[in-house]
Image: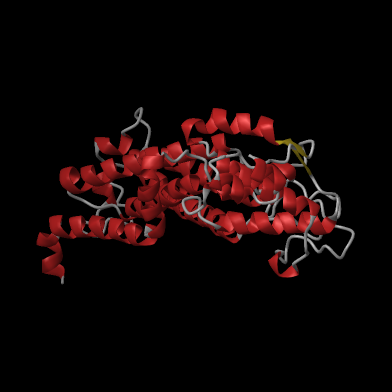
Amino acid sequence: MLIAALVPNRPYLGRLIDMPRRPQRTALITRPTSSARLTTLRAHLEELMRISIFDRTPEQNYELALITKLLDGNDTGVINTSRTELWFKSTDGNQFDSSAYDTACRTVYRMTVSARVSLSHLPSNCYEPLRPAVVGGCSLCRGQICYTGGMKAAPNTLTRSDKIYAWFLGLGGLLGLIASFVITYDELQIARNPNYHPSCSLNPVISCGSVMRTPQAHAIFGMLNSWWGLIGFSAVIVAGVSLLAAGKLANWYWRLFNLGTLFGVVFIHWLFFETVYRIHALCPWCMVVWSVTIPIFWYTTLRNFQIGVWPTPKALRGFIGFLQTYKNLILILWYLTIILLILHHFWYYFRTVL
């Protein structure tokens, strides 16, 4: 104890004489007023967000949470680290890492009291610190607020992956909506005229009419399946447009949307089984609906796990990470499985055509 007291700046001496001591933590972390320090915080936040949730260390997770809280325009801009620690403990339980939290607090505190501006870290569409006003929106805070010029950021700025996903929902939903509309039109014509011959009825196997005249075409509450497609794909388009317009949607919205896509993908696989193995015919427009529904469900589910909409159990993090890494390959294998099952079942006909 005497050695540690005489040399207070040498904490390793305390460990040499078996004096484990928790590092000192700054009690309060205050949002900086300097634009340079705020710029550095935001640049560091961007770097943390680029790291996959499965690859972040506990220190990085705590840094991400602390910086996000500091930059929250609806908050006071002051973090009481002791109170925040209690919140983390109540949330993480036994997984809370005190040492990692202390390190994160010290790191964030140092960034609030001293910082260097690095223009190379700034998104070109976010803001320019040399100007007094914000130029465009901010992809880091998802349109909540930008402090560089003290002005609110544009609420519609998205990351590149979010934009791709939003456009994918819009275009995929539009393709599914068109297919559902064509099926609805043909089914209404059949209801009006039983002898009506749909344009997609080409041969004994590829025959929309054979599928539309079965009870499976009215599987849910006696309504045409295509009507549910019109409703579902309209919701998909709305989700894509809302993401492009609002920039960020509540987690409950994505949970409900994900559950809807889950119902859709289960339903189309049931229809696939009934169409191939019970009705023994294929509907081309129905297959368009299948091919659109599967990736919408797949990419929505993986995205929701990636951004934290669905909590990821620790035991499944490795498995989810594997799915994230090979998501495109898995989707291709999914399609190939369906194609091979169709070819295997109808090979008796296709071999006469080839």
Asked if residue 134 is positioned above or below residue 210 in the image, the reply reads: below
Identify the image quadrant of the C terminus.
bottom left
**Coloring scheme used:** secondary structure
Report which quarter residue 163 is drawn in.
bottom right
Report which quarter residue 73 is drawn in.
top right
- Closer-to-camera residue (57/341): 57
Asked if residue 118 is positioned above or below residue 331 in the image, the reply reads: below
- Closer-to-camera residue (134/206): 134
- Closer-to-camera residue (249/102): 102
Residue 180 on image: x %, y % = 42, 47
Whether residue 142 is visible to the viewer of this picture, yes or no, is no
Residue at 30% across / 39% down in the picture? 217
- Closer-to-camera residue (23/142): 23
Residue 50 on image: x %, y % = 57, 58
Asked if residue 261 is positioned above or below residue 83 in the image, the reply reads: below
Whether residue 325 is visible to the viewer of this picture, yes or no, is yes
Residue at 72% across / 54% down in the picture? 41
For this view, does 142 lie left or right of residue 150? left
Residue at 61% across / 30% down in the picture? 87
Residue lying at the far bottom in this picture: please name it: 354
Residue at 40% across / 46% down in the picture? 317
Residue 88 on image: x %, y % = 58, 33
